[in-house]
Each structure stands twice: as structure tokens, then as C-alpha cells.
Amino acid sequence: LSPIYSNWILPESAVKCILMEGAGEKAFCAGGDVADVRTQLLEGGSLPQDFFYEEYQLNHKIATAYGEKGIIQISVWDGVTMGGGVGLSLHGKIRVATEKTLFAMPETGIGLFPDVGGTFALSRLKVKPAIGKYLALTGARLNAFDCMHVGLTTHYLPSEKVPVLRSVLEGLNEDAGKITKIKEVLEELRGNNSPPNPEKSVVVPHEECINKCFSQQRLEDVYLALETHNDNRDWAERTLKTLQSMSPISLKVTFEALKRHAGKHVTIGDALRDEYRLSQRFMRLQPHSDFVEGIRAVLVDKDHSPKWSHKTIDDVSEDDVDEFFEPLESNHPRGELQL
């Protein structure tokens, strides 16, 4: 995709609108591409450096395509939306949910962190910042109703209308580059349809509790808030149990990244450069990172019983976390991310 996008964003390019869809029937992107990264990491290959470098460069091209070139990207989350596909779509101008949408960033459960600009986007949802922390740390799975509520998606469309959208866009000609026209088309196709299954929302029924517990400035205080939260005890206990099943070092690094990237002065480029440093620090063996073990447990052996390098978040020091954000070593094969 990277060379294709590079051509599309050239000054002489006639591209005005990009429609991105998943190739299969069940997913926009189901993730799992990091299994190959783990294999090469263990074999001493270059993929752990190259994969994230080139992926983040592409994420940046997509994220800046509208602001710098006026190119409107429309991504249709017509199914499972996880992994690298999140980075290819989340930063585009328009994200469309359907009744099949299932979004999650469960990276703390595989010893990684919500990358591809996730630490930037999740700290900028249209709801309170605590919701982004909750999603990033727990890997909670959202349906279309939740995606629209928190602002991960911008529009809703029944799945059966997606082929119609494609046809209409192809006939817009010059109007394909007008954001007002694109939004008008989406609203017309949506009609009176609304995201289904609001009763299955994982955010709205607990939003007050999430805001109260996840608004803390230290991860340890999030745990304490959950332990003492009495308004919705069952939810608090389930959420705490979920956090305790995740990689402690991944949780601590993710929490810090969300705080650092929430600032108004921080750009998507700033966040991606930081995330490349983080990605490379996660490409280490235990006890420095849980990536190899997390991928083994979830995607290789699939026993879902990872043995994390730290028993609890209390075992992860501030120095351990800060090290992830330090400039890359001078002999790093790719060096700092160039955008």
C-alpha cells in the first residue's frame, strides 16, 4: 500500500477520494500480522525493525492526506477491525460503521501496546479521556453503537448499503473531493437506520464508572479506584480482573504513552515517532518485554496462558517505563522514524 499511497498524494495526482474496504466477508482487518514479526525476532531477521517503520510511515501518509492534500479517505469497518487495519483507517477523514462492526485494540493482552497511532487517537475521542484509557488498557470490544458514541467512527451505514456507496462515489466525478458532498451521500444512504444493539454497549451503561475510575493520573490509582468502586461492583471487579490478566509492562507503557500524547501540541507525527521507539523496545526478550510470550500464548500455541515477566504493575518501575521512550541507540538498523 505504501507506494500506492505515495503516488496518490503526489501534487500531480488526480485522486480526490479513497474508499477502503476489507477484502473478506468477516473482517475489515482481523490483526495477527505480528506473529511473523515474533518469528523473525527470534531468528534475528530485520522484520521487527522494518515492519513497524514502514507501517507507521504509511499511517502518517494516511493521517495527513486530507489536511495536506485534501484527499478524503472513507474506511468501511464492515466486520472485525483490529490490528494494522486500525492504523490504515482510524486517522482517515471518514470512518463508517456497519451493524457488523467489532472494534478493539487488545494489544496489552499480547505484550505490546495500542500502536499505529492508537495512543494518539484514543486520547482524543469525543468523550472524556478516561474512555480512551479504558479502551487502550482493557482491549474492550465495541460494536457500531459504541464506536459512534465515542467517536471512533464518524458515520453509520447498513452493510447492504456499502455496494451502493461504492457505486455512488464512482459517479461523483469532481464532487468526490468535496467533504460536504461525501457526508451528504452517507446521510442519504443511512436514511432512518441507526446502529443496532445499543443494549450490548460496553461503554454507555458504565460510562460514569469508567470516567470516575480511569481518570486517575497513575495506573496504580486506577486499580485502587476499581477496588473501592461500589456504585457498580460487578463491573469494577470484571474490569480489574481483565487488567490483571494483561501484561503489566504493556499496561504501564500504554498508560504513559496516552498521557504523553494527549497534549494539544502533540501531532500524529510526534506520536508515531514515539511509538516507533516503543515498538523497538518491545522487540526484546523477557524481562524487558512480554511481546514474544504474549504472541506465543495468543497466536502461536493459543493456550491463552501467558507467563508475564512481572507479576503485577507494582513490579514495573518508572525507570523501566521511561526507558521505552528514550531515543533509539545509535546503531539501530533503521534509526529514528523519519516522516
Image (tube, rainbow, N blue to C red):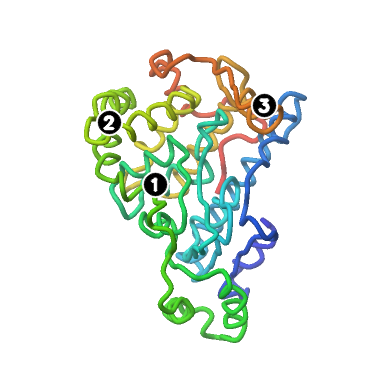
Q: Is residue 84 above or below residue 299?
A: below
Q: Residues within 10 Å of mark 1 (few under 14, many from 20)?
A: some
Residue 267 in the image, given as x and y percentages of width and height: 41, 49
Disc 2 marks a residue whose amino acid type is: Gln
Of the pair 164 and 204, the residue shown nearer to us: 204
Is 308 positioned to the left or the right of 130 in the image? right
Residue 126 sits in quarter: bottom left
Residue 237 in the image, given as x and y percentages of width and height: 35, 28
Secondary structure under badge 3? helix
Of the pair 91 and 301, the residue shown nearer to us: 301
CB under 8 Å between discs 3 and 2: no
Disc 1 marks a residue whose amino acid type is: Val
Is 333 positioned to the left or the right of 212 in the image? right
CB under 8 Å between discs 2 and 1: no
**Residue indicated by mark 1:** 202
Q: Is residue 68 above or below residue 220?
A: below
Spatial CA distance of label 1 from label 3 is 28 Å
Q: What residue lies at 66% left-to-right and 37% top-to-bottom?
A: 34
Q: Which mark is residue 217?
A: 2
Residue 300 in the image, given as x and y percentages of width and height: 71, 30
Of the pair 104 and 71, the residue shown nearer to us: 104
Secondary structure under badge 2? loop
* Mark found first going from the N terminus, 2 or 1: 1
The mark lying in front, picked from 2 and 1, is 1
**Residue indicated by mark 3:** 296
Q: Which mark is residue 138?
A: none
Disc 3 marks a residue whose amino acid type is: Arg
Is 179 positioned to the left or the right of 18 in the image? left
* Mark found first going from the N terminus, 3 or 2: 2
